Image (spheres, grey):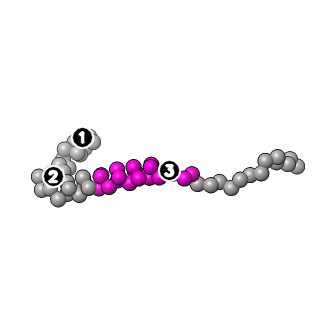
Amino acid sequence: MMQQTQQEQPAQPRRISLWLRVTLGLIFIAVLAVGFMGYLTPAMRVSWEAIASMCGF
């Protein structure tokens, strides 16, 4: 049998830095805020026919 010279360490999850976590959180909040404003603004309508035509339907 072959002996291992190095002990295997259990895999530990990578920690995300605080700055990255804060930045991603702010981006997420901004996207939600823009979507919510677009939902409440009656002038902003989604033209499903235009989206379907862009997709080739």
In the rendered image, the vertical position of residue 50 relative to residue 12, given as above or below: above
- Which numbered marker is on residue 17? 3
Q: Amino acid at mark 3?
A: Ser
Mark 1 residue type: Met
Q: Residue at x 24, y 52 (%)?
A: 34
Residue lying at the far right in this picture: please name it: 1
Mark 1 lies on residue = 54
Helix, strand or loop under label 2: loop
Mark 3–mark 2 CB contact (< 8 Å)? no
Q: Quadrant of residue 10?
A: bottom right
How would you rate the neighbour count of disc 3 (Cα within 10 Å): few for under 14, some for 14-19, many for 20 or more? few
What is the CA distance from the residue labelled 1 to the residue labelled 3?
39 Å
Q: Where does residue 57 sit, x and y in percent of width and height?
A: 25, 44
First reached walking from the N terminus: tag 1 or tag 3: 3
Which residue position holds label 2?
45
Is 32 on the left or on the right of 8, as rendered? left
Q: Is residue 26 magenta?
A: yes
